[in-house]
DNA sequence: TCAGCGATTAACT
DNA sequence: GTTAATCGCTGAA
């Protein structure tokens, strides 16, 4: 048995699943890893949002619109879509599904597992707080993700995901409407946001 | 070419 | 609860 191997890199086939809502929920508890300037940072994913293709008014790809910015969403799943919001926040998305089916999962919250000093420094914080990585801009900042990572392969050496068999209990998963997308009309009400309540903070 | 705005955060009161 | 910061992207001209 390979049960000793507690952490395994998530294969590219995982991202090709066309059910982005299911994936958004399944990504809770997965470990997001970055290697920035040779230093590996790991964090559990504790909050996500699904952006469900061209029919989703909240998505950048609504109506099949393809622009220079959202090009990464149209590529086959398993790459990063990073873009700048409000001129200052880098928002990190996992591109899913297959080519020309622009679906993505926004990583809205993480809990850092290692390199805490570096994470605090990236966030300009002194002390560890419960909400250090809660919020899409903060999650990216904790891990050192920025726009240069847009479009990169999640099987590569800079950003990847691992399965460390951390799985929220069913009752700990909370689904709810997405935030900041009021303009999306009825789509704003869809329960595409998932968070892990009472996730572990000690390992 | 350019005005308006956003999948936000932090620092206020 | 309110608001400033801040800039690349988008779409219209």
Image (cartoon, coloured by chain):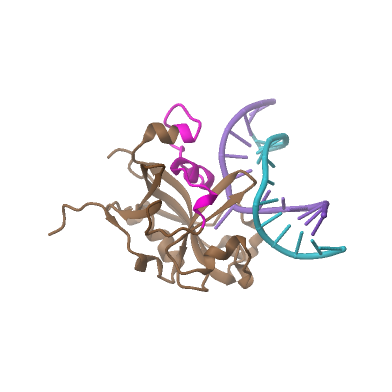
Chain colours: A brown, B purple, C cyan
How many discs mark residues in the rendered view?
Answer: 0
Residue A104 placement, left or right of B11 = left
| Residue A115: quarter of image | top left
x then y, percent, for residue A78: 42, 63
Seen at 16% across and 55% down, the residue is A3
Question: From what the image shows, is residue A56 above or below residue A124?
Answer: below
Residue at left offset 44%, top offset 66%: A77
Q: Is residue A55 left or right of residue A96?
A: right
Q: What span is in magenta?
A: A121-150
From where the camera sits, is residue A196 visible?
A: no
Q: Position of residue A44 (x, y in %)?
A: 37, 47
Residue A66 x/y as whole percent? 62, 68
Location of residue A17 with respect to A117 vertically, above or below: below
Residue A40: x, y in percent? 35, 43
On the question of residue A11 being in view, the answer is yes
The one of A137 and A40 positioned closer to us in this rendering:
A40
Q: Is residue A88 magenta?
A: no
- Indicate the quadrant containing the C terminus of chain A: top left, top right, bottom left or bottom right: top left
**Residue A139 shown in magenta:** yes
Image quadrant holding the N terminus of chain A, namely: bottom left
Query: Which quadrant would residue A55 be assigned to in this image?
Result: bottom right
Give above or below for A65 relative to A133.
below
Q: Residue furthest front?
A: A37
Seen from the viewer's position, the closer of residues A139 and A115 is A115
Nearer to us in this view, A32 or A199: A32
């Amino acid at each position: 048995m390979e049960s000793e191997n507690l952490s395994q890199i998530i294969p590219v086939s995982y991202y090709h699943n066309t059910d982005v809502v299911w994936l958004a929920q399944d990504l809770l508890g997965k470990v997001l890893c970055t290697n920035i300037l040779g230093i590996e940072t790991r964090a559990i994913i504790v909050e996500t949002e699904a952006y469900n293709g061209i029919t989703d008014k909240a998505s950048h790809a609504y109506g099949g619109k393809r622009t220079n910015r959202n090009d990464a969403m149209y590529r086959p799943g398993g790459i990063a879509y990073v873009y700048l919001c409000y001129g200052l926040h880098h928002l990190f998305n996992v591109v899913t599904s297959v080519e020309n089916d622009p679906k993505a999962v926004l990583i809205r919250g993480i809990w850092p597992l290692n390199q805490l000093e570096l994470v605090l420094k990236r966030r300009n914080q002194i002390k560890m707080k419960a909400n250090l990585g809660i919020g899409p801009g903060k999650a990216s900042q904790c891990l050192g993700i920025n726009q240069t990572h847009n479009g990169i392969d999640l099987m590569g050496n800079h950003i990847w995901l691992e399965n460390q068999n951390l799985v929220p209990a069913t009752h700990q998963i909370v689904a709810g409407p997405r935030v900041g997308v009021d303009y999306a009309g009825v789509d704003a009400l869809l329960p595409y946001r998932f968070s892990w309540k009472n996730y572990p903070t000690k390992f």
